[in-house]
Structures are given as C-alpha cells and as structure tokens.
Amino acid sequence: MAKSEIQYVCQSCGTAFTKWAGKCGACDAWNTLVEETVSAAPGGLKAMPTSARGKVEFVALDDASEAPPRHQIGVEELDRVFGGGLVPSSATLIGGDPGIGKSTLLLQVAARLARNGLNVVYVSGEEAAAQIQERAVRLKVAGSPVQLATETDLRKVLTALKAAKPDFVVIDSVQTMWSDSLEAAPGSVSQVRACAQELTRWAKKSDAALVLVGHVTKEGQIAGPRVVEHMVDSVFYFEGERGHQFRILRAVKNRFGPTDEIGIFEMHQYGLAPAKEPSALFLTADGDVEGGASVFAAMEGSRPVLAEVQALVAASSYGTPRRSVVGWDSNRLAMLLAVLEARCGVTLAGRDVYLTVAGGYRITEPAGDLAAAAALLSSLTDSPPPKRAIYFGEVALSGAVRPVARMEARLKEAARLGFEVAFVPEGSSATNAGLTLKPIQRLNDLVAYLAPDVQND
C-alpha cells in the first residue's frame, strides 16, 4: 500500500509546511494553513525517478517554423483579445466576479464554434445540465451541437476528453475539479494546482484549445496558487459593474498575442454582444462634459478608449477631509493633490475630494494624471472645462508634465469622435490629427488655462 504524507498548505499562497502554524511564513497570512494528505502512489505529485529513460531533442533558434494555426471565433472583440483567434494545444484561464457573465460568454463562444464545424465540449462542475440548457434556450443557442457534461471527477473528465477528441473545451470551473490522487478537498490549493496541471498537460498533448474558468478572491485575484497562472498560456479577467450593461475582457498574459488588450461587450437580454462603439462607450451621449469633469484619452493595448473623469471638491464638515476614489489609484490622487498644493499654490487641504471614472471603467496608466487634475480644477472653480477637449499626460512630483506613449493614436481617435482641443505634454512629436493642441509643460500651465484665480488663495 502506498505511503501517504501529511502537509499543511497555505490556502493563500500555496506554500507547504511539515507542521501547522497560526501564521504562514511565506505570505504572513493568518489561519490559512490547512492539513492535506498527499499520496505517494504513481500518478500523484511525486517527481519522476532520475533513472527514468528519455531523450531530449534540441533545436536551433534560427530554425524556421510555421505560426500555429488559429480557430477564428468570428467575434472581433474576442479575436482581438486572443490575438487573432484560438490556438490549438493551448490553455487559457479566465477569471471574474460571480455573476459577471463568464459562463454566458463561454457558452456563446462554444455554440458559435460548434456551428462553425468544430468539435466542442462544455464541462460544468457548478451547474446541472438542465440549468445550462435553460441558459442556452435564453441565449438562443440551444440548437448548437455542443457536447455538454456535468462532472467534477478529473479522471472521468480526462477519460471522456480523450475519447471525444474535441477541438475546443471549456472547464467551468477549475476550482470544482478534484483528483483522487489527493485527499484534499475540492477547491484547495493542492487540488487546484494538480487539476490545472493535468488539464494543461492534456491540452498540450492534444490539438484542443482549453479554457479554464477560475474563481476570484475578494481582492479580485484568481483564487488558488499563483503557479496556475504560470502554467497556462493566457490569463484573462472578465470585469465590469453589475449596475452597468457592459463588460470588459482584459488580457494580462498572452503567449500568442499582445497583453493589456481588451474586448468590450454589452449585456443584453439574449447574452453578451460586442459593443458598437467601444471607444466612446464610457462617454456621455453627446461627448460634452459639465463642470467637474474631463475626458481622458486612454490606451488599452492597441485600442484608444475615451473615458470621462468626474471630480467633486467640497468644503469638509470634519477635521479630516475625505478622499474617495473609484476607478483610479488612490495613491496617485494623493500625489496629485500634493503637487497641486505645493507646486501650483492651489489649496485643497481643507476640502473633501471625490473622484470617479464614469461607467465603471478603471484607469491604470499614469497618463490619466492630467485629466484628473483638469476635473479637480473644474470642480474647484465650479466652471465647465473647454468644450470638446481631451487631456492626457503624466504629472511628476516636480509639477512637470511628462510625455506618454501612443499619442498619435489617442489624438486620431479623439478627432474621429468629434473632439476639437487636446491638452497634451509639451514637446510631443505627434501630429495634431485635426485637433487644436494646447501644450502643457508644467501643471501650472493647466491651472493658468482652467483656474487662474485659485492660485495662492
């Protein structure tokens, strides 16, 4: 009989220890060590003996090889994020909040690929077959030849996949799969790691494109050990606010395409559909903004996106003023307020400051500093900014405005959407693309444009 050993595995970072402790020595998390029994039987997680025979073949770097063929999904937003389509023998991990639409999107993708002639398998460990069939009827894809299964036993799933020889496989979700080589509970770090490894290994040996659905933690990270994200070829996050109708599929890792690419979808009664005008999805209907708002020309991968930044500066009712941020980094807001006060003479210390990005969009690049400053100054003076204007530029601690990447793409997209003025860092080599450029060398220049009367109050 095979001998088993007991380990205490941190459910936060996946580090294994030989004895229990209240605090994980690797990630400093408290009360996360869980006892797990690991079997030493063949097929478990034990390493291969050094005496195992095998041959490793080496190739030169300049050997010519054809690009891997891709399965076109036929949806521009999805093909953009995947880098041109699905790659056979690849593994993709998609994470997102509960109820955000992961299963809906993947069921629509599976149905479309099945109608295009591919052999598609959808394995669910979370829902009954009747629930998925009911969703397929609502999405009007029930007639698609998708092979549906509801199973959580990894051994049975792999046996069925080897017999079916599919071209595209969805596992919903990897946290519900369990392997009988481990005695740990489903969803534990050891089970998630082992199941993801076995499924990825099968995908590499077959010609199937595998998609794993992953749960996320309350911090928004995919649950389970981080090593799972290293195993797979691509990692996507499905984002969005439940109160809004659109969703964003964001690539954070992609071995077959660009990273930081996004696909934007709208949630309708019959499922998710590509957004008709993704660049202007986060703007008001006419593109004009009122006092306390500005328009930021952002870049998401190769796509320019225009988003509205809203700010409110009000008198504080308490001794310590409030700072509330939605859709932007709170640390960057604190830095920007300090620069406005120390370098520009704009007094904000005794005021409440609220800043949000409209539509649930999240700004992740430093180029949004200038747009946030414009919204703050507009709210402080209670006057609207120049009409049909965009802003982008990174603000340094010295008050200087630094150039940003892909300026021409931002300007061209803004001109296409009808904008007329662009506040940009001075010294940029980009053409005006039909817009009137307002060069900003230092943050003082923006204050002089928008709020000349608030300095040194």
Image (cartoon, grey):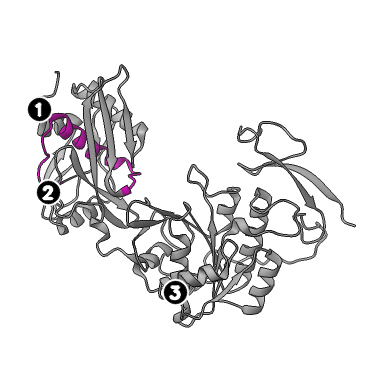
Mark 3 surroundings within 10 Å by alpha-carbon count, few (fewer than 14), some (14 through 19), many (20 or more): few
Q: Earlier in the sequence, mark 2 or mark 3?
A: 3
Q: In the visual, does 379 lie left or right of 318?
A: left
In the image, farthest residue toward the bottom: 117
Segment colored magenta: 360-389
Mark 2 surroundings within 10 Å by alpha-carbon count, few (fewer than 14), some (14 through 19), many (20 or more): many
Tell which of 139 and 96 is nearer to you.
Answer: 139
Q: For the C terminus, which image quadrant?
A: top left
Q: Where residue 127 sits in the image (x, y, percent)?
A: 56, 63
Q: Secondary structure at mark 2?
A: loop
- Nearer mark to the viewer, of 2 and 3: 3
Residue type beneath disc 2: Arg
Measure how far apart labels 2 and 3 are at the Cα level. Answer: 44 Å
Q: Is residue 187 above or below residue 443?
A: below
| Residue in the image at 75% along x and 60% along y | 180
Q: Secondary structure at mark 3?
A: helix
Q: Is residue 23 visible?
A: yes
Magenta highlight on residue 419: no
| Residue in the image at 37% along x and 69% along y | 270
Residue type beneath disc 3: Val
Report the residue marked by disc 2. 388
Q: Is residue 309 above or below residue 434?
A: above
Tell which of 328 and 173 is nearer to you.
Answer: 173
Q: Earlier in the sequence, mark 1 or mark 3?
A: 3
Question: Given contact means CB atoms under 8 Å apart, are the residues at marks 1 and 3 in contact?
Answer: no
Q: For the N terminus, which image quadrant?
A: bottom right
Question: Given contact means CB atoms under 8 Å apart, are the residues at marks 1 and 2 in contact?
Answer: no
Residue type beneath disc 1: Pro
Q: Is residue 63 above or below residue 394?
A: below
Measure how far apart labels 1 and 2 are at the Cα level. Answer: 20 Å
Report the residue marked by disc 3. 137
Report the number of numbered marks: 3
